[in-house]
Image (cartoon, rainbow, N blue to C red):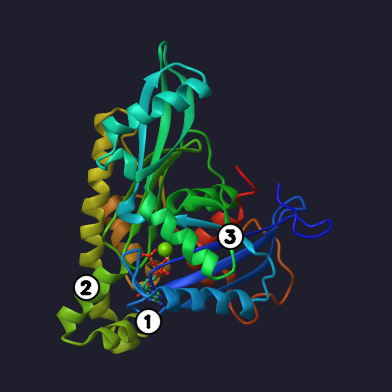
Amino acid sequence: MFQFGRGSRRTVGLDIGSSSVKVVELDHSGSIPALVKFGRCGLLPEAIVDGEIMDHDVVVDTIVELMEANEIASKEVVAAVSGRAVIVKKIQMDVMNDDEARDAIQWEAEQHIPFDIDDVSIDFQVLDRETRPDKMDVLLVAAKKEMLESRASLLRAAGLSAVTIDVDSFAVQNAYEQNYDHPEGTVTLLLNVGCFVTNVNIVRDGVPYFTRDLSFAGNSILEAVQKDLGVDQDEAAEILENPGEERLEDLQSIVGLVGEELAVGIEKSLSYLRASGEADHIDRICLSGGSSFAPGLRESIEKHQGSPVEIANPFRNVSWEEGMFGDDDPEILGPHYMVAAGLALRQGGD
Ligand SMILES: Nc1ncnc2c1ncn2[C@@H]1O[C@H](COP(=O)(O)OP(=O)(O)OP(=O)(O)O)[C@@H](O)[C@H]1O
Ligand SMILES: [Mg+2]
């Protein structure tokens, strides 16, 4: 457990996304986590492209500015990676203890990871030791070392250090489990639609059954709006955020088509789970990320997936002092902070 000051146990989640950096600080000394600070700061569009840092200095300055503007004193943060450089897979291994598994995982990973094994860092968690008499379920996570090093060097340059580097999808899951009831057996699809990446995580009873990042998100919506309405990128972004009455219908139908494509990607994930006999339906969907605001996306996903879609709010089961949100509604800000809040929910080492 990390102690940042007497009597307080605080953690800072820092979500470095391609379109903005978000931060959430939580205090864990009470019965439920208390929100201490939160904020976000937009990045120039070229600073991070598809998760890759293009302009190191701009990103560092943005992180520093965000931490200062929100008066966050802690220098230790929980950060995350996502996208193509990260692979999450549920695999089966012969039953063994954790130490033996640590030795065996490298060989197992070579069979499951499409990267050179020397280029990735591997982590794992035993999910179920009794899948079959002689087999256990293991969650294998591999992240490109290059990506992890790039994150660590960004943080160092911003005067910070990472206590943990997590994965966006798991942070979303963490925030979901803290804030929503999840009755036994319920299959939940967690969808975090960002700028370049959509984090898909199908969860049942706390276990991520299928975790994949699709390279299809807000940017795809933006391109569709540009093309269909014949406007440039800035105009498309403006229309997306403030469509006005006259453009709303056009926009909903464009976003609806994008939602349909997203649904096809999700369907592929689900067919994988069906084939393995692990889940044949989805009970509910929780939608987060900046693109969850795109007019018509929620409805389109609901229609194609046939399950109710809830817009995520990571501040539902978190306490805060009156006035912290000013005139803003936490329900409306919530979807932006799902990853950052989920990261801040990680208390040292877990
Ligand atoms: N009000 C809004 N209406 C429609 N789209 C929006 C709105 N606000 C933000 N977006 C879109 O949300 C996306 C940014 O979402 P988010 O902040 O979750 O992404 P990110 O974490 O920065 O990026 P990534 O995780 O993909 O690297 C952008 O594509 C932006 O166009
Ligand atoms: Mg993101």
Residue 290 bears which disc, if any?
none
Is residue 263 positioned above or below 61 on the image? above
Residue under label 1, please give it: 241
Spatial CA span between label 2 and label 1:
14 Å
The earlier-in-sequence mark between 2 and 1 is 1
Is residue 176 positioned above or below 275 on the image? below
Q: Is residue 192 left or right of residue 2?
A: left
Measured from the top left, where is residue 277 in percent x and y? 30, 27
Spatial CA span between label 3 and label 2:
42 Å
Residue 254 bears which disc, if any?
2
Residue under label 3, please give it: 161
Element assignment for label 3 = strand
Query: On the image, which quarter does residue 133 sit in?
Result: top left
Q: Amino acid at mark 1?
A: Glu
Q: Nearer the viewer, residue 290 or 149?
A: 149
The earlier-in-sequence mark between 1 and 3 is 3
Element assignment for label 1 = helix
Mark 3 Cα shell of 10 Å, populated few (<14), some (14-19), many (≥20): some
Spatial CA span between label 1 and label 3:
34 Å
Query: Does residue 217 appear in this view?
Result: yes
Q: Residue at x 83, y 56 (%)?
A: 7
The earlier-in-sequence mark between 3 and 2 is 3
Q: Amino acid at mark 3?
A: Ser
Measured from the top left, where is residue 246 in percent x and y? 28, 89
